[in-house]
Image (cartoon, helix red, strand yellow):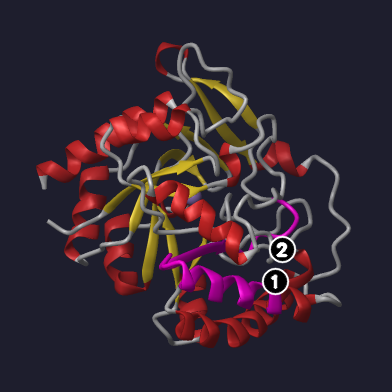
C-alpha cells in the first residue's frame, strides 16, 4: 500500500482538535488558516497563520512534532497576495519574502508548500446552510446568483494572470529546488472564469498542463483538490494518473453538480467513486499528504467555519482510512 499521509487541517495552537486527531490515529497536520479565528466566511482572502519568522516557524513545527504530529505541508505564510498575482508594484519584494519562507520551510523539514492563484475571491460559495442528510449543513455555489452581484474593478486579463504566474514560478522554482521544497498549486474554486469580473486561470486540466510546462521541475507541482476536478467534470482517477508525480498534496472531497451550480456532499454519497480515486493515488505511489476538505457541519456544531467543523472530518478520516485499507 502506498503511504498516503492522512492529514488534518489543524489550528496553529493546541486545542481539542489536536487531541481528536491523535485519538483517530492521524499522524500528520497542516497548520491551517480556516482553523483559526471563526466567523470568516468563504470568499475572503485570509491571512495565513504560518509564521514568516524562522524561529516562530520552528517552534510551531516542534509543537506539533512533540505530540506526534508531523507537518508535511504548510501555506505561503501570507507572502503571496494579489500584488504578485496581478503583477503590481511591490511583487518583487513579496516574491523575495516567499523565497525566504521557502528556505525556512526547507530548513525545518517541511517538504511541501501549497498555494493558489485565485485573485480577490478565495473559495467562493453562495450558500453555507444547505441541508443534507439528517439536517447536516453543507455549502453550495450558484454562478447565476453570484454574477448578479457587483463586479470587481480589476484591470487584468487571464493572460495577465498567466504572465504573472510565469514570472513568479521562474523566480521561486529554483529556490524551492535548492530548499528541498515542492510547490503545490491549488485549483480555483469554483473552476470558472471570470467570476464577478475577476479572471481565473487554474480551472481545467489543460491549465495544469500549462502550469507544469512553465517550469518543468518536480518542484513545480499540484495540490490535487478532488472536488474541483469533479466540478471540472473530468475523469478524476484518469487525472490523478495523468499528473502523477507532479501531485504533491491532495484534498479529499466530492461535489454534486457542474461548475456553475454545485453542492458539497458527504464523501460516501456523492457522485464520485472515491475508492477508485484513492486506487489511482495508490497506483501512482502517492506518498504525500491528503486531507479531508469541506465537510458537512454536524449536530451540535455552530457552522462558524463552514466546511471545516470537526465532526464531519472525523467521519471523513474514518471513511478515508477504511477505503485505503480496502485497497
Ligand atoms: Mn481544496
Count all numbered tags in the image, as a single digit. 2
* Residue 13 at x, y percent in the picture: 54, 40
* Whether residue 267 is visible: no
Q: Residue at x 65, y 43 (%)?
A: 124
* Callout 2 secondary element: loop
**Residue indicated by mark 2:** 199
**Residue indicated by mark 1:** 158
Q: Nearer the viewer, residue 316 or 36?
A: 36
Label 1 with label 2: CB-CB less than 8 Å:
yes
* Residue 146 at x, y percent in the picture: 72, 40
* Whether residue 111 is visible: yes
Label 2 CB, ligand 1: below 8 Å?
no
Among the 4 quarters of the image, the one containing residue 312: top left
Q: Is residue 291 left or right of residue 10?
A: left
Start-end of magenta stretch = 96-121
Label 1 CB, ligand 1: below 8 Å?
no
User: Does residue 128 belong to the magenta stretch?
Assistant: no
Q: Is residue 129 left or right of residue 96?
A: left
* Residue 272 at x, y percent in the picture: 31, 42
Mark 2: few, some, or many residues within 10 Å (few <14, many ≥20)? many
User: Does residue 110 belong to the magenta stretch?
Assistant: yes
Q: Is residue 303 left or right of residue 181?
A: right
Q: Residue at x 55, y 71 (%)?
A: 104
* Residue 319 at x, y percent in the picture: 25, 34
Amino acid at each position: 500500500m502506498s503511504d498516503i499521509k492522512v492529514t488534518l487541517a489543524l489550528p496553529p495552537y493546541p486545542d481539542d482538535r489536536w487531541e481528536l486527531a491523535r485519538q483517530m490515529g492521524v499522524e500528520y497536520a497542516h497548520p491551517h488558516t480556516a482553523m483559526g479565528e471563526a466567523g470568516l466566511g468563504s470568499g475572503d482572502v485570509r491571512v495565513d497563520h504560518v509564521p514568516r519568522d524562522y524561529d516562530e516557524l520552528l517552534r510551531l513545527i516542534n509543537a506539533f512534532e512533540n505530540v506526534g504530529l508531523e507537518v508535511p505541508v504548510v501555506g505561503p505564510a501570507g507572502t503571496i497576495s494579489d500584488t504578485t498575482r496581478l503583477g503590481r508594484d511591490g511583487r518583487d519584494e513579496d516574491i523575495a519574502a516567499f523565497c525566504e519562507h521557502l528556505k525556512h520551510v526547507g530548513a525545518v523539514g517541511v517538504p511541501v508548500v501549497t498555494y493558489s492563484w485565485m485573485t480577490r475571491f478565495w473559495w467562493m460559495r453562495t450558500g453555507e446552510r444547505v441541508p443534507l442528510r439528517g439536517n447536516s449543513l453543507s455549502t453550495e455555489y450558484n454562478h447565476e446568483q453570484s454574477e448578479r452581484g457587483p463586479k470587481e474593478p480589476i484591470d487584468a486579463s487571464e493572460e495577465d494572470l498567466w504572465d504573472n504566474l510565469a514570472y513568479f514560478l521562474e523566480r521561486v522554482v529554483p529556490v524551492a529546488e535548492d530548499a528541498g521544497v515542492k510547490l503545490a498549486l491549488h485549483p480555483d474554486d469554483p473552476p470558472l472564469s471570470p467570476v464577478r469580473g475577476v479572471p481565473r486561470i487554474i480551472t481545467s486540466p489543460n491549465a495544469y498542463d500549462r502550469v507544469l510546462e512553465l517550469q518543468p521541475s518536480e518542484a513545480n507541482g499540484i495540490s490535487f483538490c478532488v472536488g474541483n476536478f469533479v466540478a471540472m467534470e473530468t475523469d478524476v482517477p484518469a487525472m490523478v494518473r495523468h499528473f502523477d508525480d507532479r501531485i504533491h498534496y491532495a484534498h479529499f472531497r466530492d461535489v454534486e453538480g457542474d461548475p456553475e451550480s454545485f453542492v458539497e456532499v458527504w464523501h460516501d454519497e456523492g457522485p464520485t467513486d472515491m475508492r477508485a480515486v484513492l486506487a489511482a493515488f495508490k497506483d501512482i505511489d502517492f506518498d504525500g499528504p491528503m486531507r479531508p476538505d469541506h465537510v458537512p457541519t454536524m449536530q451540535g456544531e455552530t457552522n462558524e467555519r463552514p466546511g471545516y467543523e470537526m465532526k464531519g472530518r472525523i467521519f471523513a478520516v474514518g471513511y478515508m482510512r477504511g477505503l485505503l485499507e480496502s485497497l
